[in-house]
Amino acid sequence: AKQDGRNCFGYFSPDMNNNMLARITLEQSLRSAVLQHEFCLHYQPIVDTSSGEGVALEALLRWRHPQRGLVPPDEFIPIAEETGLIEPIGEWVIQQALRDLRQCHSQGIMINMAINVSGRQLAHGDPSHFACMLNGLLQKYDVAPQYVHIEITESILMADTELSLKALTAIRHLGVEIYLDDFGTGYSSLSYLKQFPISVIKIDKSFVDNMLEDRADANLIKAIITMGQSLDMRLVAEGVESEPQRSFLQGLGCDFVQGYLVAKPMPLKELEPLLRRIVRE
Ligand code: C2E
Ligand code: CA
Ligand code: CA
Ligand code: CA
């Protein structure tokens, strides 16, 4: 019992208090970030594996914290999801991405835009809620739905199959395509995925990282590509950093690549010269 007591006491260590304090501080500054417009988007191109043609941009959220500088999304999105702040933030992301896409199109850069969406943004009592919001913004920013892709992760599909199927179907009915992000990190089989209206599978970077050295990862990627193709889905490999990786993926028939090999995520302005070279008129 004494042992238990000590463990119990240990639970409220100064460290833990610091963690909780850090969390509460983060939550508060995240709230004010929404109001103070501290967010911005960086963009990373997705290109055709063989031709190098630019086909899409992925919008990646950044937080310009007045004291801490640029905060990466992994450090605040989980808290934004827990607190529900992901809803206003996520809506801002869509608006900004569509505004920037409109800007590209007016300059003749006819590229697609892939936008990350959290489960919490789709999980509403009314499964058409998200699609209605998206449709309103497509009209507002005068963007054709075929140019917009929504990236979701497997966990969304596992959480509430019926609701997510309805929410995704409503999005697909607008003419917006759905990408399955980080594929291979969850537990769903491709046959399970078949029931969802998914057009593109993104193979997680963790498999791409070691595929040239690790036979098991290479075989996994081969299997994902083969099965994806048999389901009529296209494939993107993420985190491609080297030319040997690109050419290996090309050999396997992977349609698209994304990664530092082509470009790091950056503000649209800085990316424009590259886009003018790689996007077909
Ligand atoms: P993700 O959707 O899997 O995005 C890809 C991540 O890999 C990005 O990290 C990107 O910068 C990074 N990356 C791309 N190519 C390479 C490469 O060649 N090498 C390396 N080392 N990294 C590469 P980032 O921007 O830090 O985003 C992390 C995650 O945060 C994203 O992972 C996504 O899950 C989430 N996220 C970002 N923006 C949003 C957003 O607007 N909404 C939501 N809900 N989540 C977002
Ligand atoms: Ca993504
Ligand atoms: Ca991803
Ligand atoms: Ca990833």
Image (cartoon, grey):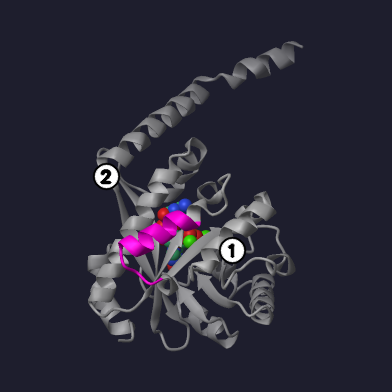
Badge 1 marks a residue whose secondary structure is: helix
Name the residue located 42 percent from the left edge and 88 percent from the top edge. 51
Looking at the image, tell me whether mark 2 or mark 1 is earlier in sequence order: 2
Q: Residue 280 falls in which quadrant of the image?
A: bottom left
Disc 2, disc 1: CB below 8 Å? no
Query: From the Cβ of disc 1, is ligand 1 less than 8 Å away?
Result: no
From the image, tell me which residue sits under label 1.
169
Q: Is label 2 or label 1 in front?
A: 1
Residue 27 on image: x %, y %: 41, 33
Residue 276 on image: x %, y %: 26, 81
Residue 50 vs residue 280, the one in the foreground = 280
Q: Can you say which quadrant of the picture contains the C terminus?
A: bottom left
Residue 31 vs residue 29, the one in the foreground = 31
Q: Which residues are magenta?
A: 131-144
Residue 105 on image: x %, y %: 28, 75
Q: Within 10 Å of the Cα at label 2, are there few (<14), some (14-19), or many (20+) other Cα atoms?
A: few
Residue 86 vs residue 8, the one in the foreground = 86
134 in magenta: yes
Name the residue located 31 percent from the left edge and 61 percent from the top edge. 140
Query: From the Cβ of disc 2, is ligand 1 less than 8 Å away?
Result: no
Q: Can you say which quadrant of the picture contains the N terminus?
A: top right
20 in magenta: no
Name the residue located 29 percent from the left edge and 64 percent from the top edge. 100
From the image, tell me which residue sits under label 2.
37
Residue 192 vs residue 165, the one in the foreground = 165
